[in-house]
Amino acid sequence: MRAEYDAIIVGSGPNGLAAAITLAQRGLSTLVVEAARTPGGGMRSAALTDEGFVHDVCSAVHPLGIGSPFFRTLPLAEHGLAWVPSPTPLAHVLSDDRVVTLERSVAHTAAMLGSDGPAYTRLFAPFVERWEELSRMVLGPLRWPSSPWLFARFGLVAMRSMLGLSRSRFATEPPGALLASIAAHAMVPLDRAFTASFALVLGAAGHAVGWPIARGGSRSIADALVRLHASLGGELTLGHEVKDLRELPRARAYLLDVSPRSLVSIARASLPPHYVERALRFRHGPGSFKIDWSLRGPIPWRHEACRRAVTVHLSGTQRDIFLTESTVHHGHIADQPFVLLGQPSVVDDTRAPPGKQTAWAYCHVPHGSSVDCTSRIESLLERHAPGFLDQVISRATMTATALEAFDANCVGGDISGGLPDARQLFFRPMAKLDPYATPAKNIFLCSASTPPGGGVHGMCGHWAARSALDRVFGLLP
């Protein structure tokens, strides 16, 4: 470390690195300080089970990574990042073993939905055709939209509950179940306002850019961002946990890729009591229980469609999903929870030794849960892929509490950076014209606890850096 920098960024997750790159692109001196011994935050990969098997510890599938308005401007391929598409972005298993799929083509997906096909096309086609415009508007703070009519059309649908949208648009079960399982990624009960927005954004991204993975593991995204930052003159320090901003070198601006409560802990001396009180009221959502497997071979799915999809939802009907997610929000775990499964080695041969496979799955659990859900997940998987357990070489599990121990930003196992309900979807960590700025003129929050929230897209960091460029450096018009 030098004695002084233009900007110091605490945390090397996707948002911390995006903030550092945005500032370094303007010729500013930047230092990223990371507590772990490897960069990336949730974008880390490791041999969790056996030597030669590469598992993504947290983030794994990246529709908003390849679709990120900021990442799309960066030469990440030149720094080693390769996106690997899934032939079918998503397969959803209904309770009676029927499978409905999200295909890259809207028309192909609609064709499988029978009488609801035209309604599905009317819902998604306008947003898929103009994905680049839409993504720039929705992946950021509230501001005047660049395409007001497109944004208004999106908003009128997105503000609805997922259950309300489904009931008003579809007459049959498959499309509602497919979209409900996508909306469930938000971990908000599906009868709540704005839950339809998650199905719209992730569904449209699936059609427009796919649900790809990073070749070699999610760590490849972090590695590419680190290399790009270094090529711009940026510095990185690993294995240094920041407990107080005053322990860092001098800087004109500090950007923190941390949770609101960690922001308070690290920068309390510089923050007024009223801001501290509001930051500590920020609410985190349910947690996740995750399991990784090393496998002797492919998962023996009953249905062929599940064999070509990197992402598989084992979640049943729309009502099943609503009940399981509501159960979690009432502090319990369903006997057959919503299960999201990934099988990256279907398309990426770097993930396992020849002939072998890797897979992972997670389910939602109450905030801060230490319950092991292995038997719940594996019994459901064995039902839809008989003989799966015979394929297992070894497994590694991570409870919600263990997830927080791995990444402090996942408070209580919350992988979304905070509950994205109607109150906190737009106004996070609190209602402010500039959600990234704090009352301390040179301290900014740049984590997923700011708009647009969770996901590996770097937009929270990019927008926070733009706030700093304006407020501290005067480098924005």
Image: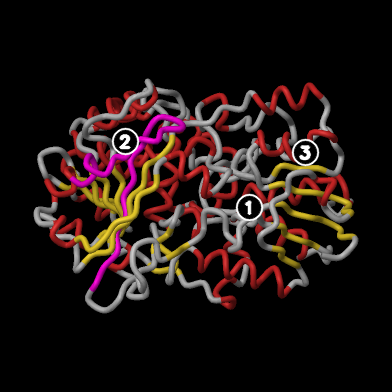
Q: Which residue is mark 2?
A: 180
127 or 183: nearer the eye? 183
Name the colour scheme: secondary structure
Q: Position of residue 316 (x, y in %)?
A: 20, 37
Q: Judge depth for marks 3 and 2 and give the one in front.
A: 3
Question: Which dot marks residue 15?
Answer: 1
Quick check: is 361 in the magenta stretch?
yes
Q: Judge depth for marks 1 and 2 and give the one in front.
A: 1
Secondary structure state at the residue bearing disc 3: loop
Left or right of 336? Residue 34 is: right
Kindly identify the amino acid type of the residue bearing the numbered disc 1. Asn
Quick check: is 227 in the magenta stretch?
no
**Real-space Cα distance between discs 1 and 2?**
28 Å
Sequence order check: which comes first, mark 1 or mark 2? 1
Left or right of 199? Residue 23 is: right
Which segment did they paint magenta?
Answer: 356-378
User: Local crowd at mark 2 within 10 Å, few (<14), some, or many (≥20)?
Assistant: many
Q: Which residue is mark 3?
A: 437
Q: Is any part of residue 105 visible from this angle?
A: no
**Real-space Cα distance between discs 1 and 3?**
15 Å
Kindly identify the amino acid type of the residue bearing the numbered disc 3. Ala
